[in-house]
Amino acid sequence: MAAPTATAALNATVFAPGDQMLLTVTYSDADTKPLTVTIVVTDAQGNSSAPVKVTAVIDPLTVTVTDNSGRTWTRVSDNGSVAVYRSVA
């Protein structure tokens, strides 16, 4: 199994106390497995419904953010490949 990869960037390199800090994390995993299930319902006369599909991800990723000051980071957004976190300097 491949290990997940991540890159991260802050919105600045220097912050004054009280400044908003935004952290953008880009992440992926080469062996995450998308799964599609297709369902068709058929009655006794052979009539079938249209196919219905549902999707899921096997081996989902979780992003955890900590820093050495104990600061709290709040997730602003996460689309499954890019996550943005906010904190205060």
Image (cartoon, rainbow, N blue to C red):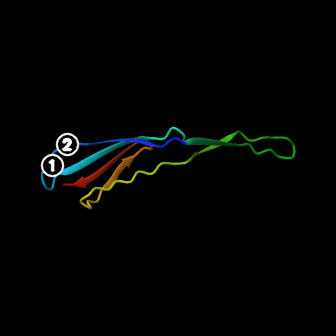
Q: Nearer the viewer, residue 23 or 50?
A: 23
Dots 2 and 1: beta carbons under 8 Å? yes
User: What residue type is disc 1 on?
Assistant: Phe
Q: Answer few, some or many: residues within 10 Å of disc 2's Cα (few below 14, many 20 plus, some between 14 and 19).
A: few
Query: x and y percent of residue 31 in the render?
Result: 54, 40
Q: Secondary structure at mark 2?
A: loop
Name, please, the residue furthest toward the bottom: 70
Q: CA distance from mark 2 to mark 1?
A: 7 Å
Q: Nearer the viewer, residue 23 or 37?
A: 23
Query: x and y percent of residue 74 in the render?
Result: 32, 56
Question: Residue 12 got which mark?
Answer: 2
Q: Residue at x 46, y 43 (%)?
A: 4
Q: Is residue 81 visible?
A: no
> 62 above or below 48?
below
Q: How many marks?
A: 2
Q: Answer few, some or many: residues within 10 Å of disc 1's Cα (few below 14, many 20 plus, some between 14 and 19).
A: few
> 4 above or below 18?
above
Q: Quadrant of the N terminus?
A: top right
Question: Residue 15 got which mark?
Answer: 1
Q: Nearer the viewer, residue 88 or 29?
A: 29
Tell whether 81 sits left or right of 87: right
Tell whether 59 sits left or right of 67: right
